[in-house]
Amino acid sequence: MAEASSSSVTSLPSPSPSLTEEELTLTVKWSGKEYTVRVCGDDSIGELKRRICEVTNVLPKRQKLLYPKIGSKLADESVLICHLPLKSSLKMTMIGTVEDDIIVDQVDSSEIVDDFEIGQDEAVDIKDKDINKQKLRRRIDQYNIDVRNPCREGKKLLVLDIDYTLFDHRSTAENPLELMRPYLHEFLTAAYAEYDIIIWSATSMRWVELKMGQLGVLDHPNYKITALLDHLAMITVHSDARGIFDCKPLGLIWAKFPEYYSAKNTIMFDDLRRNFVMNPKNGLTIRPFRKAHANRESDRELVKLTQYLLAISKLDDISGLNHKYWESYKEDNSKRRRQA
Ligand code: MG
């Protein structure tokens, strides 16, 4: 589905670099007020909607953007802004409502659940592209991380996705605890001994706080969460093979806490490999936790991952590991070899 929606974009001629990097300041009229958002030509409409969400709290999928002459192109989130006749200081109108019931919202949301492998060469390419580095710099400038608990000296960093990683958000249950991945608190307690923990979800902060609060993660006596990040911290990148998609650049966290976290001591768990594309060596693709009612008894992924996390925490530098082979990691000999 992602490919189909972006095919119209990739078939268009590539715009000149000056157009893609140019920063636009747009005015969005919504609910009787005007808001200013900044985007660049290489950003997608999806990205524009996230910036609008930042100032209005209307979730991107609830926004309808209107501007004469552009019409339906504003409805396609994969279209790049440089492909539209948009100029700085232009005013567009947004129609949309702030969510009140985000539980309902999650259930009816259409979501891309398919993942894809990005070839080694292309992943390197995406990470090193100037335009993506520039997007990351802008995100570092714009996004504010609210620190809930202080970073701890000498600890590594574990970054965790929520949906399908810690929680089955597609199944229904009377109590959200039924949809929590088994051993979550045991896992977080054990990891906390060696890692600071940051939760990063591609949903809104309201959803992140609500979900983590319901599961008892935010006030647990045995571990503390350093920070929560949401979809607004993500960036949109373009892959020649896969079109336009969003990812979670760890460089944002490293830039905010340079004295604590770096590529050498950070690991991120996510069920979607594409989220790692800006930092492929720091990502571990976790098996998705789906169909909670059927799999609750047998899912032991977090137990096994606890052992891996604690084993690699003894290394000073974990950037040389290939997390793809985490299940066959052997602590003793490989540790010395990789450290050398
Ligand atoms: Mg997920």
Image (cartoon, rainbow, N blue to C red):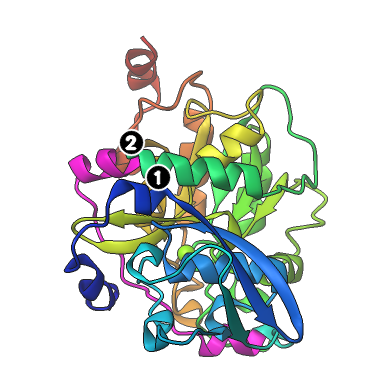
The magenta stretch spans residue 111: yes
Q: Which mark is residue 293?
A: none
Tell me residue 243's x, y (percent): 26, 63
Q: For mark 2, what is the residue? A: 128
Tell me residue 259's x, y (percent): 66, 23
Q: Is the shortest distance between ligand 1 and the CB of mark 2 under 8 Å?
A: no
Quadrant assignment for the N terminus: bottom left
- Magenta residues span 103-127
Q: Can residue 181 be seen in this snapshot?
A: no
Secondary element at image label 1: helix
Which of the 4 image quarters holds residue 63? bottom right
Measuring 50% from the left and 71% from the top, which residue is drawn there? 297
Taking depth in this image into account, of 21 and 306 the one nearest to the observer is 21
Measuring 41% from the left and 86% from the top, which residue is drawn there? 69
Secondary element at image label 2: helix
Q: For mark 1, what is the residue? A: 132
Q: Are marks 1 and 2 in contact (CB under 8 Å)?
A: yes
Measuring 53% from the left and 81% from the top, which residue is drawn there? 61
